[in-house]
Structure formats: structure tokens, C-alpha cells
Image (spheres, grey):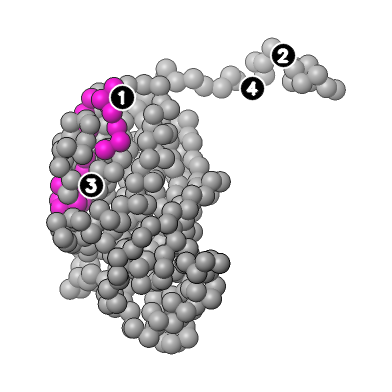
Amino acid sequence: MATQKLVRSFRLPSRAFASASSSSINPNAVGPFEVFDRKVKRIQKNRAAEHDAGESSRLVDYVREEVADRMAERFMDIRRKFDHVLDLGSGAGHFSQLLERDKVKRITMLDLSRSMLHRDSDEYFDVPVERRVVDEERLLKDIPRFSQEAITSCLSLHWVNDLPGVLVQVNEALRPDGVFIGALFGGDTLFELRTSLQLAEMEREGGISPHISPMADPRDMSSLMSRAGFTLLTVDVDEVKVGYPSIWELVEDLRSMGESNAIIGRRHFLHRDTLAAASAIYKALHAEVDGTLPATFQIIYLIGWKPDASQKAPLKRGTGEKNLQDVLGSE
């Protein structure tokens, strides 16, 4: 498992922190998978893209750009040219901006947030793009079944309520022998911040509340992809580590990324003394030798193909013509 450490310069942080909030605990809840308030997530992403005409948002693209670059390498390894790619939960198009005309003819970007979707102009893209405001959780409402040759998703699926259901919809939207390539945050993402906040709340308030959203366990993703109908699976995990001067810069950058807390039933604020205690705990438990505070982003990369008769398959058991011992030269 490879780990990449990023260090960047930071502007002076704002000392206030409060999550975007809705007026109620999602009256439109529809089932047991309702974990995130999608309306709040849209507000957070719109706000991040609109602040300072998107400049604050662009300053914190470092994680998405790194992950999009690694995902693009996986995409380029596929020896096939595509007429069209559907970029699901595209955000500002960090992945789509890396695609070239000799590989892809056109791209459709889908995202929940109109402001984030239109943050960057067409001059950022080498390939012609179409932008559509679509909720990832309702993909088949806007995209016909069996219509896509390639679907990608870069750092969006960790905010969907029903991840298995969305993977099924992606599979349904693909043509036979179509490919899905995705990247999402894994369960160890921001574990340093999570543990520091929990310990601080226990100390100062006598209890804990969720501040970091639940994320997928890498060990479950192969099973989820298989259950969704994908074949020829590839699932791998790596990490991106970013060094921050303090917890304040980390919290400020998460907000500028549009990655603030959107869990249903969350607390809409953090007490200043609790966050100050979390800062001290973070330094005590996780600080590097140079004093920077590391933040780990665990990334799960997924590749899956929609089944088709043309795909290669392993031979049936017992049809081998050579003994493995003969090939290895051992008894």
C-alpha cells in the first residue's frame, strides 16, 4: 500500500467553525439507508464553490487532484478508446480535466451541486463536456439503462446513503462489457481527527456525537461490487497524507472542500473549548517531529466490468493439460 504525503502552505485560518445545517432532521427520510442529509450536502458544496468566486475552493483541491491523477492512470491503462464517459458526482471535474481527446471523445459530468458543477469553465478541459445537475442516488431517473460504455466516479460516493444501491444503478446504466472506475474515501480517512474529537468531547462534555461521516470498509468493497453485478473486479487501497500546521487549518480546508459534516441528527456546532481540547489531543497523539499534524485520507479504487459473453473467463476445473509440478520443476 503506497502512501503519498502532501504538504502545502496555508492562509491564516478562521477561528470559528460551524457545520451547515438544515431546519429539521430530514423529513424526507425514505428508509434504513438514510444516513446523510443530501439537501445539506448540496448547500455545503454550493457554498464552497461560490465563496470568493471559487478561489477558496480551488486552493483546497490538492486531495482531489492527487486522487484524480492516480485514478486517471488506472483509466489510461485500459486499452480501449471511448466515445463517451459519464463522470458521476464529478464535482468541478477534477478527473474529467485529465482526460484527453485521443482517449475520450466527450464527457457528461453529473453532480448534485450546480455551483460546483459549473465552477470551472470549459477552458480547463481538453475534451468537450456536458454538465447536468443529477443526484447520484437517483441515477436511473436521468440516465437510461444499458446506455453507457464507461462510468467514472472520483470522491463522491462516500456521501451517498445507499452505496450498494448506487452500484447496482451504475451497473444497470452500463452496456454489456462497459466499465466502471471509481475512487472513494475509506473508513480510516481522518482517523486522527475522529479520535481527537471523540476524546475531547468525552473529556469536556461527557459524551460523543458524530463529526466524521461513516465510510466504506475496503474489505467489503469486493463483495459489494460483486453483488451489484460487476465482474473482473479490481479493488486496491492507498493513502494520501497531508501535513497541517494545526487542527484549525484542517477544519477550515474541509469546509472549503464542501466536506463538512452532513450526518442526519448531527450537532450543528462545536464548542470552542472542545475544539481547543481536540487540538491539544491531536498534537499529543499524532504530531510529527517537525510539529505538523498529519491527516490521513484512505482511498479505495474500484474497477468493475458489466458481464458480457465476449469477456475472457477461466477454464473449467479439470480441463488443464499440464501438471503444475511439471511447470514449477518440483515434486
**Disc 3/disc 4 C-alpha distance (Å):** 48 Å
Mark nearest the camera among 3 and 4 is 3
Q: Is residue 204 above or below residue 55?
A: below
Mark number displayed over residue 317: 4
Judged from the image, the secondary structure of the residue bearing numbered disc 4 is loop
Q: Which residue is mark 2?
A: 322
User: Gap between marks 1 and 3, in whole Å?
Assistant: 20 Å
Q: Could you say which is closer to the camera, residue 270 or residue 119?
A: 119
The count of marks equals 4
User: Mark 3 or mark 2: which is in front?
Assistant: 3
Please name the residue shown 67% across and 19% down the image.
Answer: 318
Residue flagged by tag 3: what amino acid is it? Ala
Query: Mark 3 near mark 2, Cβ–Cβ under 8 Å?
Result: no
Name the residue nearer the viewer: 266 or 299. 299
Sequence-wise first label, 3 or 2: 3
Q: Which residues are magenta?
A: 97-118
Question: Element at badge 1?
Answer: loop
Rendering coords of residue 254 (x, y %): 32, 63
The image's mark for residue 103 is 1
- Which mark's residue is nearer the viewer, 2 or 4? 2
Q: Is residue 203 above or below residue 156?
A: below
* Viewer-nearest of discs 1 and 4: 1
Q: Which residue is mark 3?
A: 92
Is residue 116 shown in magenta? yes
**Which residue shows up at 15% across the image and 42% down it?**
121
State whether residue 9 appears in this view. Answer: yes
Q: Residue at x 22, y 31 (%)?
A: 126
Task: Tell me if residue 161 is in the magenta stretch.
Answer: no
